[in-house]
Amino acid sequence: MIASFRAVPIFAGLNDGALELLAGRAKESVFNAGALIVGEGETGNRFFVILSGEVRVCKRLGRPGEVELARLAQGEFFGEMCILETLPRSASVLASTEARLASLSSMDFLQLYNRMPDQYGILVLNLARDLSRRLRRLDEAFAARH
């Protein structure tokens, strides 16, 4: 699992000790195509890394006005907001194909903070960069439509 984590942008720059800590705490799950992984509005504290397969991130899933926000594949991640806040899920995620995922709880990240605060700082900086990139893409998509 450490090799898979090395390829994930949010873990870029973390040392072997930090990667080993996170990989050792990760829970692996497999979801069949069409399976709901997380639902918009649910309480959740798990962050997910896609080890294989593809997922769809959607708002208003199965309701009028459904919007697909993203398609994510191997090496990408979702659920990162749970690292920063304890609000309900902002979107639903479902497996487009069979998807093998590794997940970490917010408590797993707290362990990283407690044991290796410098490594946690790198992870939070990477997270901020990724959130900024995603926000920029949404801004551009919004501006193109209006």
Image (cartoon, rainbow, N blue to C red):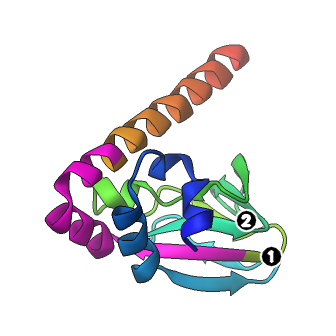
Looking at the image, residue 131 sits to the left or right of residue 137; the answer is left
Looking at the image, residue 114 sits to the left or right of residue 31; the answer is left
Badge count: 2
Which residue carries the number 1 mark?
34
Which residue carries the number 2 mark?
62
Coordinates of residue 137 in the picture (x, y in percent) = 61, 27
> Which residue is at 34% across, 39% downward?
125
Vertical arrangement, residue 41 with respect to residue 23, above or below: above
Vertical arrangement, residue 112 with respect to residue 84, above or below: below
Vertical arrangement, residue 98 with respect to residue 133, above or below: below
Q: Which residues are magenta?
A: 100-122
Mark 2 nearby-residue class (10 Å; few <14, some 14–19, many ≥20):
few
The quadrant where residue 13 appears? top left
The quadrant where residue 22 appears? bottom left
Give the number of the mark in front: 2 or 1: 1
Judging depth in this view, the residue of 146 and 117 nearest the camera is 117
Q: Pick whichever of labels 2 and 1 is earlier in the sequence.
A: 1
The quadrant where residue 86 appears? bottom left
> Which residue is at 80% across, 76% downward?
34
Q: Is residue 25 magenta?
A: no
Q: Where does the N terminus fall, quadrant-wise? A: bottom right
The three-letter code of the residue at mark 1 reads Gly
Coordinates of residue 118 in the picture (x, y in percent) = 21, 49
The three-letter code of the residue at mark 2 reads Gly
